[in-house]
Amino acid sequence: MICPKCNLAQLDNNTECANCGIIFEKYFARQAHLPESGDPITLNVHRKELKAKMGNFIALARELFFHVASPVNSFYFSGRVLVFLLIFFWGWKFVLSPIETNYAGQSFMHLVNLPFHEAGHIIFGFFGQFIMMLGGSLGQVLMPLTCFLVILLKTRDTFGASVVIWWLGESCMDLAPYINDARDLKLILLGGVTGNEVVDYHDWEFILRNLGWLRYDHALAQLTNTVGILLMMISFVWGGYILFKQYKNLGSCLE
């Protein structure tokens, strides 16, 4: 016979394995009572374990993204409502403005994004010209993304995180006209010149030309703008829900 544990060939009348020492009668008796991997008992156990893991994941996500301290200070709550109304109505102006109008590039938020854009060129300039040109746009989106992670994970301010998601969406929409101009080269850039006037000055003309994607500039611009719109919509829903939860937890004492 063959030992079912160590696969050693031995005499049929052996009661235990000469190699690993298992007692065949006890081994086979124990195996007879174990459920097969596909039987209902095992499947139910697996389902329960999966449900428990999913339940833990959902609870963790709920605590991370929808955390609200209790009680909520009424003065701070009023300020958050004002901020929400501002970004909500202003955000719709960004959403409804076509890329060709370059509303995002002419808004106050463009002045907020610009220092991070230019800093990105400097920071990523150590990695060659292509990454340096791309670094401006990377810096512009990495700054709100970094703020989002810090506010959400460190300070646990879910409403503040929803506001930063709005900023991230706006930053994407601010980039869209720039990408859209890669072939036209008509936008007035920093320094008062256009991409037509200075060689390799327009970030996205350089990036897309080197990638061989110049003909896709309008499609990529639309995609970037759409991502920005979706992020803004998420911020509206998320921020509104957090305010609703905070309203239910309003307290009279100062925090």
Image: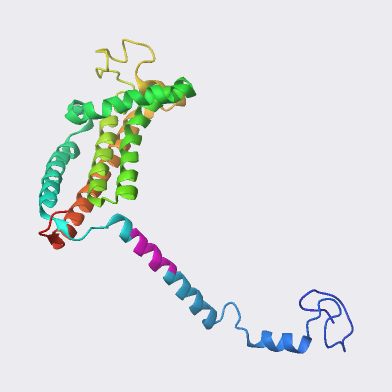
Residue 58 seen in render: yes
Magenta segment boundaries in residue numbering: 53-61
Task: From the viewer's perspective, tell me whether residue 94 is left or right of residue 151.
Answer: left
Vertical side of 229 occupied by 29: above or below: below
Q: Quadrant of the N terminus?
A: bottom right
At x 22%, y 50%, the residue is: 159
Where on the picture, by quarter, is residue 168?
A: top left
Return the residue found at the far right: 11
Front-most of residues 242 and 8: 242
At x 39%, y 15%, the residue is: 200
Residue 208 seen in render: no
Is residue 5 a member of the stretch shown in magenta? no
Return the residue found at the far front: 254
* Residue 186 horizontal/vertical position (percent): 26, 18
Is residue 56 a member of the stretch shown in magenta? yes
Name the main secondary structure of what is drawn in magenta.
Answer: helix
Vertical side of 239 occupied by 224: above or below: above
Please count the marks in the image: 0
At x 23%, y 31%, the residue is: 99
* Residue 85 horizontal/vertical position (percent): 11, 45
Front-most of residues 187 and 48: 48
Vertical side of 143 occupied by 13: above or below: below
* Residue 53 horizontal/vertical position (percent): 44, 67
At x 45%, y 23%, the residue is: 130
Front-most of residues 250 and 64: 250
* Residue 16 horizontal/vertical position (percent): 82, 85
Where on the picture, by quarter, is residue 209?
A: top left
Front-most of residues 79 and 31: 79
Task: From the viewer's perspective, tell me whether residue 81 is left or right of residue 49.
Answer: left
